[in-house]
Image (cartoon, rainbow, N blue to C red):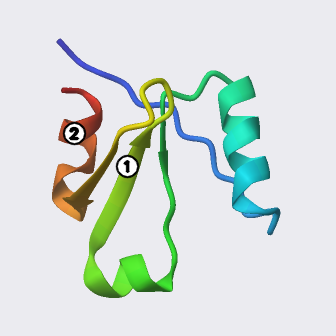
Amino acid sequence: MLKGLNVLVNSSGQKLSKQIEKAGKKKAGFMVCIGSEEIQSQKYKIKNLETGKETEVSEDTITNTIFE
């Protein structure tokens, strides 16, 4: 079965709390924040917006983590 992934990008410069609020209003299931530290380390934190659980993953496992 082919799985799709809808992606929203917010580069507005708003505070993170406002961005999380907007993501929730758009019914986003997960959030990944990408900054210079994440790019350098190639480790990303995925937050499940329904449960609040955060998981740190490598770039090549982001999609698998979301679809678990």
**Along the polypeptide, which appears first: circle 1 or circle 2?**
1
| Callout 2: SS | helix
Q: x, y (%) of residue 49?
A: 50, 32
Give the image quarter of residue 58.
bottom left
In the figure, 9 relative to 15: above or below? Answer: above
Q: Is residue 64 left or right of residue 17?
A: left
Callout 2 environment at 10 Å: few (<14), some (14 to 19), or many (20+)? few
Q: x, y (%) of residue 61?
A: 17, 51
Q: x, y (%) of residue 64?
A: 18, 38
In the figure, 1 relative to 10: above or below? Answer: above
Q: Measuring 27% from the left and 70% from the top, which residue is drawn there?
A: 43
Q: x, y (%) of residue 34?
A: 49, 68
| Callout 1: SS | strand
Q: Residue 13 carries which label?
A: none
Find out whether the residues at labels 1 and 2 contact each other: C-beta distance under 8 Å. yes
Image quadrant where one finds the N terminus: top left
Q: Measuring 72% from the left and 52% from the top, which residue is drawn there?
A: 17
Q: In this view, does 53 lie to the left or right of 26?
A: left
Furthest-front residue in view?
Answer: 52
Question: Which residue is labeled 2 in the image?
Answer: 65
Callout 1 environment at 10 Å: few (<14), some (14 to 19), or many (20+)? many
In the figure, 42 relative to 36: above or below? Answer: above
Image quadrant where one finds the C terminus: top left
Q: In this view, does 3 lie to the left or right of 7?
A: left
Q: Measuring 67% from the left and 36% from the top, which residue is drawn there?
A: 23
Q: Measuring 49% from the left and 27% from the top, which residue is drawn there?
A: 29
Question: Which residue is labeled 1 in the image?
Answer: 46
The amino acid marked with disc number 2 is: Thr
Furthest-top residue in view?
Answer: 1
The amino acid marked with disc number 1 is: Ile
